[in-house]
Structure formats: structure tokens, C-alpha cells
Amino acid sequence: MALVAPAGPVDDRETARARALLERWGLRPRTTPRLSATHGDYLAGSDETRLADFTEAWLDPVVRAVLCVRGGYGTQRIADRLDHRRLAAAGPKFLVGSSDITCLHQAMGEALGLVTLHAPMPACRPVHVDEATAASLRAALFGAAPRSLALDGPVLAPGRAEGILTGGNLTVLASSLGTATAPVSEGRILLIEEVGEEPYRLDRALTQLRRAGVLRGAAGVVLGDFTDCGPPDRVEAVLRERLSDLGVPVAAGLAAGHGPRQLTLPLGARAVLDTALRRVTLPPHERSTA
């Protein structure tokens, strides 16, 4: 396992916590001396440093998975500089992360045809305090992830949809429109989650996706957590208004994103959303994994 920080800065305490978790699982985490670098007050080193660390970790022949220690902001600043030809030559590996790492999921998953893991970062609190969060990440890394996930939120539009699971953080998806890592949702099940955005900001981002045609092409939409986004009834009202008229199944309540329980999801894998069963199932997929 290689620990990298392609976005926000990581302190020594976070790195130690991530290492300890992986070592308890019998894994061998690797870090670079540049992991604790900073640039300004919101980046984990310069763009060149973060790009070099990620590239070196991916190209290391003994590394089977590259785990992002935290999110924050900064991944979009290096996404267009990834050398996909070199990265593809290293063979399939797992990319692990969420939040700002949504941009890397789009960049790596689409260009290399990989299944990537939308997962809690190993330094983040839920993976250390919630047994189900830790078990889900561990199972995915060891190739034994559960094939069925419950939805405990409202159904905004009923139905059944099947397609490749894609998506991630709403703000990152919306801000990637018009770029090489713009979300591809045609015929796919789109996962959306968010943290710390007021209802009107959720509305604005969803409207941006609608205007760009991203939501119109999706086969279905599954909603993760919308943590600290305002009163739940107001959040639900915005989601219902902007998503329920798409003509595809839309359901909420998947424990993924920034909530107290963060399940690991295989982006790029085939999934089935069934609102009657209130479940997302993951039959065997055909795309490459580690």
C-alpha cells in the first residue's frame, strides 16, 4: 500500500494513524518523505510534488493499491498532468479515496478502465471508530467486499436501473464540467454525496449538472450522505425537486460520503439500483481491478 496526499496537507499524526490501521490488517504501507509537505495553507506540497508522489507510488512495482490519506482540495490541479500511458503500463491497481479524490476517480477510472474504490481515507475518523466502515474498506482491499448495500433514505423516483457505478462528490463533479475529467453518466448509475454545502448551493450544483446534460443521460441516481448541508427536510426538498423528474430511479440513504458510516464502493463496477428492494447490488463486474 502506498500512502499519498494529492490534495490537502497531511500532518504526522494523520499519517501515523493511517499506517497503524493498515499494519493491523497485515498490510505494508509505504510513504515518501514528501508526504508531509505543504504549499500555502491548503495544499500538500506544490503541484509538482503531489504529482510526482502519486506517479511514483503508482509506478512502484510492489504497490498494489494507492491510498489517498485525505481529501480537501488540489486534485484538479494535477489531474490534467497525469501520464496515462506510463500509469497504464504499471498494470491495474486500486485507487482509494473520496471527496476531492472524485477527480482522480474520473481521471484514472475512465482513462485506464479501472474499478476504483470510493472509500474513506485511512486517516479519517470514521474508519477508526465505526466497525462497519473499517470492515467495508478492509473487505474491498482484500477482494471480499459485500455485494449488496442497503438504502435507508427516501425513494425520490421508483424503479430499477442497471449500469456502471460512477460519480462521487457533487461539488467536484459540477466543477469538472468542461474538463477532461467531466463526469460520464450516460447509461450509468450516478452516485452523489456532499458535505458542508447549504441547500441553495446543492441546488446550484445539481442545476449545473442538469444544464450540462449529465443528469439527463444517467440510468439512475443513488444518493449518499449530505453531511452538514442544512436541515434534512430542506436538503431532501432540494434533491427531490432537482432529481425526481429525470424519468429514472432515484433513491437516497446509501452510507457513503462524509457521514459517520462510510462504506467502500467500487466505481467502474456494474451495479443494480432497485428502489423496491431499497438496495444497490453489485454483480460480478467486467472491468479491470487490482
Image: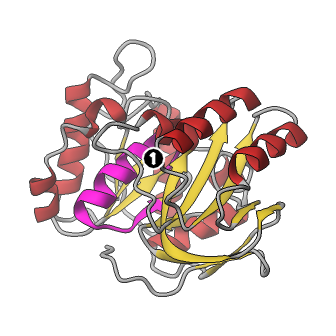
Per the rendered image, the range of residues in magenta is: 98-117
Front residue of 209 and 24: 209
Looking at the image, which residue is at 75% across and 74% down? 275
The relative height of residue 274 versus residue 237 in the rendered view (above or below) is below
Residue identifier under label 1: 102
Front residue of 271 and 73: 271
Image coords of residue 43 (percent x, y)? 39, 23
Quarter of the image with the N terminus in it: bottom left
Q: Is residue 72 left or right of residue 87?
A: right
Picture quarter containing residue 189? Answer: bottom right
Q: Is residue 48 left or right of residue 164?
A: left
Name the residue type under label 1. Thr
The relative height of residue 101 versus residue 223 in the rendered view (above or below) is above
Front residue of 117 and 161: 161
Front residue of 186 and 48: 186
Task: Identify the residue at the far top of this view.
Answer: 40
Mark 1 packing: few (<14 Cα in 10 Å), some, or many (20+)?
many
Element type at marker 1? Answer: helix
Task: Identify the residue at the far bottom of this view.
Answer: 284
Q: Is residue 186 left or right of residue 79?
A: right
Count of number-bearing discs: 1
Looking at the image, which residue is at 43% across and 56% down? 96
Picture quarter containing residue 6? Answer: top left
Q: Is residue 238 left or right of residue 73?
A: right
Q: Is residue 63 visible?
A: yes
The relative height of residue 134 versus residue 203 in the rendered view (above or below) is below
Whether residue 111 is in magenta: the answer is: yes
Image coords of residue 141 (percent x, y)? 45, 70
Q: Is residue 122 visible?
A: no
